[in-house]
Image (spheres, coloured by chain):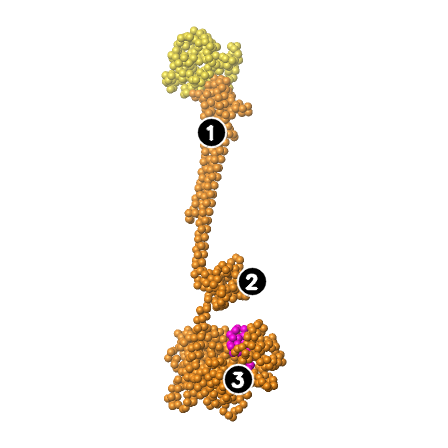
Chain colours: A yellow, B orange
Amino acid sequence: MVAALCLLGVSVTANSSRGESSGLEYAVKGAFLYKLAAFVEWPSSAFDDPAGSLRLCVVGTNPFGEQLAQLTAGQRIGNYPIQVRRLGALDRPAGCHILYIGNADALAVSRTIQGVRGKPVLTVTDARFEDSTRGIIHFVLRDNRVRFEVDSDAAARNGMRLSSKLTSLAVPGRARSFGP
Amino acid sequence: MNRWEATPVVAIIGAVVLLIAGILTTVYSQSIYQAQKLNEVQVQAQVVSASVAGALAFEDSAAGTQYLAALKRNPEVAAAGAYDERGRLSASYSRSAGEMPPATAPSPGSAQRGRHFVVVVPVMQDSIRLGSVYLRTDAETFARSARRYAGIGLLTLMASLLIGVLAVAQSTVRGANIRLKQQADDLREVATRQSAIFNAAFDAIVTLNPSGGIETINRAGERMFGRAAQDLLRRDITLLIDLGREGDGDFLKRVGETPEALAGGLLREVTGRRCDGTVFPVDVALGAMELPDGAHVVAVIRDITDRKKTEQLKHEFVSTVSHELRTPLTSIAGSLGLLSGGSGGKLSVAAGRLVGIAHSNCQRLVRLINDILDIEKLESGKLRFEFAPVDVGELVLSAVEDLRGYAVEFGVGVKVAEENATFCVRGDVDRLIQVVTNIVSNSLKFSPPGEVVEVTLSREGHLGRISIADRGPGISEEFQGRVFSKFAQADSTDTRQKGGTGLGLAISKEIVERHGGRLWFASVPGRGATFHIDLPLIEVAHTSAQETADGRLLVCEDDPDVAAILRETLEQDGFNVDVVATMRDAATAIAQPKQYAALLLDLQLPDGDGVALIRRLRERDETRNLPIIVVSAYVDKGREVARSHSLNVVDWMEKPVDIERLRRAVSAALAGSASSDRRATILHVDDDHDILRVTATALAGLGKIISVDGLAAARAAILQERPDLAILDIGLADGSGLELLPDLDELEGDIPVVVFSAQETDPALLHQVDEVLVKSRSSMASLARTVRRLVRDPERPLV
């Protein structure tokens, strides 16, 4: 933990050009990412392999660096270890449980989201990258704190259910995407 | 253990059980309650943790605080905190300003910290440790409930204790009541029994308080004295019976007894008084009841009027019978004696033998009657002993002397040991002679001819012993126990040979015992027997003259001149003399506590018979031993009042008369009379004609016998011819022979008088007057001497 903190601090300093406390911000988001898994219900088909793991995938830009892997080391969701994967452009995201879309391109984001529609993938978008297209979870910043919006319909479309503990913490969304 | 003792035990056990149960319950429920409470808080914390999970996961302090704020609804929650996985306080809740959760998460757990329950639970979501929740609640209400529990428990305990105590108390009280009731029943039963005994008793039962006041009296008592119980309450017992001195004070002291003496029972014969004033004899048995307030007395009173009457009747019967038996016997014995003596002419051998048989048997009959009378007198206590110092040595010699003839008859010798140390006892000399005579004669009877009966005197400690030893057949084992019983003779075949009445030893034993001694024997059958008479020794005390009694004499004489002479004579000799002129005055004077040393009594008194007075005086304890001198000095009117008055001569004899003795007495009396050259004239006054005839025959050779049967005839005879001797019977049909004394005295010279009496009813009189009538033919001058002698030494026989 301390090491992670130090790293955070380093990365915060390193990434200070990107924006104040953005390193800290992504540390928090990273933590949120895997914690989200605790408040989400996948259909049983998503976890049919007992020897499997919960796959936390990042597509597009990886703002977390190595933090994710560090943060999730040793953690388990239920009985599943968390596996962090960095998806290339050509990798198919359907095998992921949580998919963080770090694209600034709204179209790419939308296309990614469409690609996993109906599949039990928790799509997480980030307002930092693109604010018009939203996944099921959409990280936003409010009062200098990391918050998120949730789209329960989108979750339902993907066959997932979001815990009320999660949804109650969500901030209300401003604009809805009427995208597909 | 009865019911009433089991109940308190049960109650106590029950109370203890309740107590233990109460304590256990309280403690148990306390701990359960505490666990329960902790659990509740824990659950509460879990709920909180679930609700803040999201806030913690996503670092939403506001949300967390909001969730925690919901705890406000529970007033018991003092503080709560939500901490992230790093232990940093993310959100908090405080009930009040001072109650803050800790800044960093404490380790998970639950415990009671003083007045708070503190619970820390981890916040997990789907296996992810998100942080922890801290919850602190008041234990106050718990404590309050605990206290309430304790209070209830205590109350239960006290209630149970109270119930237990009440049960114990109640059963104790009930048990005590049962016991009390039982005691009351027992007491009532005892009281009922006692009351029944009290009232059913035939004798009067009276209980007295220590002062002699009557507390209770039973029905028999009311009947006996003719009074009602309530009238007698608190009255003194002397109202009913003459017991104890009059006055106040301790009753027992008045009676002269102590409670301890009463413990052995005390019986007295006193006089009872009925409400109408009549008196009657009673036996009183006293017992003591030691009560807290002193010695109460219970008196059981028995009316013995009937008994006395019976005794009196018996006594009269015996004496009447004896008189009736004796009188003819006198004649028989006398006649036979005379016959065998040859007074009726010479008898043939055969006739002589027959007469001898009849005579000796007659004498035996006489002795038997005497013995029976003696025994009766002894047993009824009527036999009066004249106790005086007795020289036993002389007594024994005199008794043995009298038996010489008897001894010769049996061919047995009597030896009185020479070296005998004589001793003195206090006793009646005649009766003791009777005893010694009886035993020696028995020994003589049972000794074989040629043997010797030995009499020895010895001292054994404080006793003097007369031992009479014979070498006869001894006394067999079987008979030894019956030796002293009445009419017991060893061998009935012996009876006729040996003679004897069978009463001798019984009488002797009684006499010895009345003397405070013991009559016993030792015998080896076949070797002889030795009888011992033990008597308490006395020191030969010189009866000192009672200087005070020396003082006062009472003279009862109606002739003032004679009285004056008597007074003068006696006063010259140093006596104080009181003179009275009538019998009544004499009786009054004697009744007064002034002690008279002697009474000089004229038989011929204006208001009565001096003999009757003598008799009365002899019956009373105080005057029984009063020396009485009968004075019939008759002043020859016209003669100078000089000292030429004579007194009377008497010698008493008892019927059945011993003719020999009579002859001796008459001879002796005549020998002293003035004229011896002419045939003496003997006046015999007796109302029994047979006696007259026998006596006349017996005295035929001594003189001319004039036999008359009454006073009047006697007086006529005296007028006709002056007798030289008078033989008087006391019991005459028309008076007492003594009444002739004055008449005799009127005659010239002194006439000796011999007096007969068969009146057993006045043994005291006879015996006493024997002492009293002075055998003196001398003049007044010797009266004083005689009186003095009588006064100083009244026991000494006067010859």
2 or 1: tag closer to the N-terminus: 1
Q: Which residue is drawn at 47% across and 18% down?
A: B55
Name the kind of residue labelled 3 in the image: Asp
Per the rendering, the mark at residue B37 is 1
Q: Is residue A114 above or below residue B420?
A: above
Name the residue beneath numbered marker 3: B743
* Residue B611 sits inside the magenta stretch: yes
Quick one: B588 or A1, which is closer to the camera?
A: B588
The disc label shown at residue B632, or none: none
Q: Do the residues labelled 2 and 3 touch (CB within 8 Å)?
A: no
Residue at the spot 61% in from the left edge and 77% down from the top edge: B576
Please tell me whether mark 3 sits on a helix, a strand or a loop: helix
Labels 2 and 3: the sequence-earlier one:
2
Spatial CA distance of label 2 from label 1 is 93 Å
Callout 1: few (<14), some (14-19), or many (20+) C-alpha neighbours within 10 Å? some
Mark 1, chain letter? B
Any magenta on residue B325? no
Residue A72 image point, x, y percent:
45, 18
Q: Give the range drawn in magenta.
A: B610-632
Q: Residue at x 49, y 91 (%)?
A: B679
Between marks 2 and 3, how big is the CA–CA gap?
56 Å
Q: How dense is the environment of label 3, judged by Cα within 10 Å: few (below 14), some, or many (20 and up)?
A: some
